[in-house]
């Protein structure tokens, strides 16, 4: 009886070991199968991308990521799906993929590229900055992340350039609204808009006009000291600009008349010089003819 129990125990242990080996073998085969399926899906997506079928490519890249999420190819597949949408101008889908990528893979080595492509996907959606600023603001936010978190990359250089362009757009928006308020004689609202340009977008092409408008507005409402302050600021930085001349004319009414007189005199002098020059040229030609 004891011998039978012992034999039964040995048989049970042997069966469990055998089953364990079979399970491991099946698991290994399953993992290998998923790995192969993932590679196949990725390659199919890459092929479709080359052929221009970007929607199918994005679908296959997503499939590759889902099949084997533990693989190093999973985050690459997610980025390729986002890129597939981007190159075909499906910017909303690209944004969705990239925002998900940043949440799921926050420490991935290509995070700089993900933020840059996300910012660019927003940037490409800018249509009319006078109506909708959502795309503009989101683009700037993500370009700033690229510059601040990844300063030593090529993406940071291009992001800095794009930020300057976006600031021009935002300054343009402020000027557009400011001019409207000025026209409607809503002085305080106009001043706030023009000051935003001077305070936050001083490197844009609109800062000269903003300073001029501030001088004009303060002068109109009788705050001459404030007007002079901004006039001095404009003169110090942009003395040779037309906006400075317009500003100066507010304080010196004779200035524009003197300026116009000088311009007309310069035109007369220029014409006279050209006339004398033509006489010399004609005389030189006559001499050459005589020699011949």
Image (cartoon, rainbow, N blue to C red):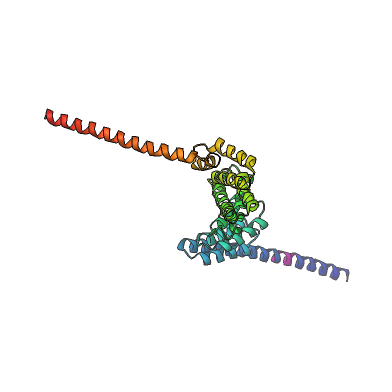
Along the line of sight, the residue nearer the viewer: 194 or 254: 254
- Looking at the image, the residue that sits furthest to the right is 2
Magenta range is 17-22
Q: Quadrant of the N terminus?
A: bottom right
Q: Is residue 133 above or below residue 246?
A: below
Q: Nearer the viewer, residue 266 or 289?
A: 266
* Residue 136 x, y percent position in the rendering: 58, 55
Residue 21 lies in the magenta-colored region? yes
| Residue 168 visible, this angle | yes
Would you identify the image quadrant in which residue 227 lies?
Answer: top right
Q: Is residue 119 magenta?
A: no
Residue 110 visible within the image? no
- The percent coordinates of residue 175 (x first, y second) are 57, 51
Residue 120 at x, y = what percent? 55, 54
Residue at x 23% of width, y 33% of height: 279
**Residue lying furthest front:** 254
Magenta: main secondary structure equals helix
Q: At 46% across and 63% down in the image, what residue appears?
A: 51
Taking the image as shown, residue 165 lies to the left or right of residue 106, namely left
174 and 154: which is toward the camera:
174
The quadrant the C terminus occupies is: top left
Q: Residue at x 58, y 63 (%)?
A: 92
As drawn, 65 above or below 263: below
Q: Quadrant of residue 276?
A: top left
- In the image: residue 168, left or right of residue 279: right
Count the marks.
Answer: 0
For the residue pair 6 and 127, the one nearer the viewer reads as: 127
- Please say if 50 is above or below 263: below
């Amino acid at each position: 009886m004891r011998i039978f129990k012992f034999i039964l125990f040995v048989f049970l242990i042997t069966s469990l070991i055998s089953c364990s080996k079979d399970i491991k073998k099946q698991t290994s085969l399953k993992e290998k199968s998923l790995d192969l399926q993932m590679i196949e899906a990725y390659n199919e997506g890459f092929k479709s991308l080359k052929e221009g079928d970007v929607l199918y490519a994005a679908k296959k890249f997503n499939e590759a990521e889902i099949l084997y999420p533990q693989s190093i190819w999973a985050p690459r597949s997610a980025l390729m799906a986002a890129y597939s949408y981007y190159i075909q101008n499906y910017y909303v889908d690209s944004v969705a993929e990239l925002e998900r990528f940043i949440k799921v893979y926050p420490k991935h080595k290509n995070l700089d590229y993900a933020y840059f492509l996300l910012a660019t996907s927003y940037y490409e959606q800018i249509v009319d900055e006078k109506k909708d600023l959502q795309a503009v603001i989101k683009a700037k936010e993500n370009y700033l992340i690229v510059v601040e978190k990844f300063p030593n990359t090529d993406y940071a250089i291009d992001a800095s350039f794009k930020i300057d362009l976006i600031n021009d757009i935002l300054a343009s928006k402020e000027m557009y609204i400011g001019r409207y308020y000025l026209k409607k004689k809503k002085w305080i609202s106009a001043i706030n808009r023009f000051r935003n340009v001077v305070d936050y977008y001083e490197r844009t092409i609109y800062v000269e006009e903003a300073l001029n408008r501030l001088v004009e507005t303060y002068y109109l409402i009788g705050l001459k000291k404030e007007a002079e302050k901004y006039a001095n600021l404009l003169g110090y930085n942009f003395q040779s600009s037309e906006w400075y001349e317009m500003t100066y004319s507010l304080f010196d009414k004779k200035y524009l008349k003197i300026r116009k007189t000088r311009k007309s005199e310069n035109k007369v002098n220029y014409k006279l010089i050209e006339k004398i020059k033509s006489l010399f040229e004609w005389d030189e030609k006559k001499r050459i003819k005589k020699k011949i």
